Amino acid sequence: MVEDQRYSGIDFTKNPLDKDTYDHCSFIDCDFRSSDLTNINFRECRFELSNLSLARIESTSFKDTGFSHSKMLGLDFSGINSFLLSLSFAHCQLDLSSFRKLQLRGTVFNSCRLEEVDFTETNLNAASFVECDLNRAIFAHTNLERADFSTAFNYSLDPENNRLKKAIFSRMDLSGLLQNIK
């Protein structure tokens, strides 16, 4: 187990991260592009200003892990270890990523770009999308009860195909709910 370590400016594409458990570690300005992070456990870790685009994260654990100002294009979160899963995102690019079928109850997405992200069959009960761009994001059979979209934009949701009870929307962006109604 690796505890309380700070990794800064490391290119993990050349020197892969050891398969281990990382507890209370921070990764600042690190490059994980296309890296193999499978079967690694991250507990109470922070990723800042890092690039995790196209990293392999099957069976990876993220417990109380936060990402900020990071590029995370094309990540497939659907195969991660979901036991005690807890994530937060601030100022991240998550385009073309997938959160399919995950339990993301209460997850906060703050000022993120989520273009073409797949949230099919995801539980986003009480999740917050604060000033997030959800252009072409996929919501199908998704639990969005009590989710906050009040400052989100470019979303398109089919109210007949998703659970929206007590979800919060801005009056300005109600058209995102009406696009799919025929």
Image (cartoon, rainbow, N blue to C red):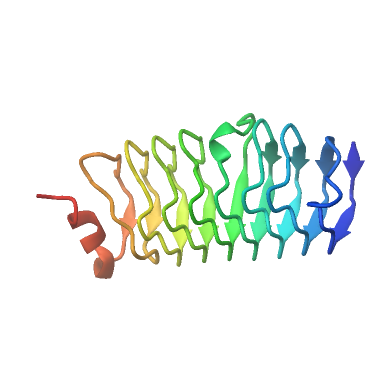
Nearest the viewer among 61 and 13 is 13
**Residue found at x 25% / y 67%:** 171
- The residue lying furthest to the bottom in this view is 172
- The residue lying furthest to the left in this view is 182
Horizontal side, residue 133 vs residue 12: left or right: left
Instruction: Give the percent coordinates (x, y) of residue 66.
Output: 67, 53
Is residue 117 shown above or below 20? below
**Residue found at x 45% / y 63%:** 132
- The residue lying furthest to the front in this view is 14
Q: Quadrant of residue 2?
A: top right
Nearest the viewer among 161 and 86 is 161
Horizontal side, residue 150 vs residue 25: left or right: left
Horizontal side, residue 40 vs residue 159: left or right: right
**Residue found at x 72% / y 62%:** 48
Is residue 160 shown above or below 151? above
**Residue found at x 46% / y 55%:** 128
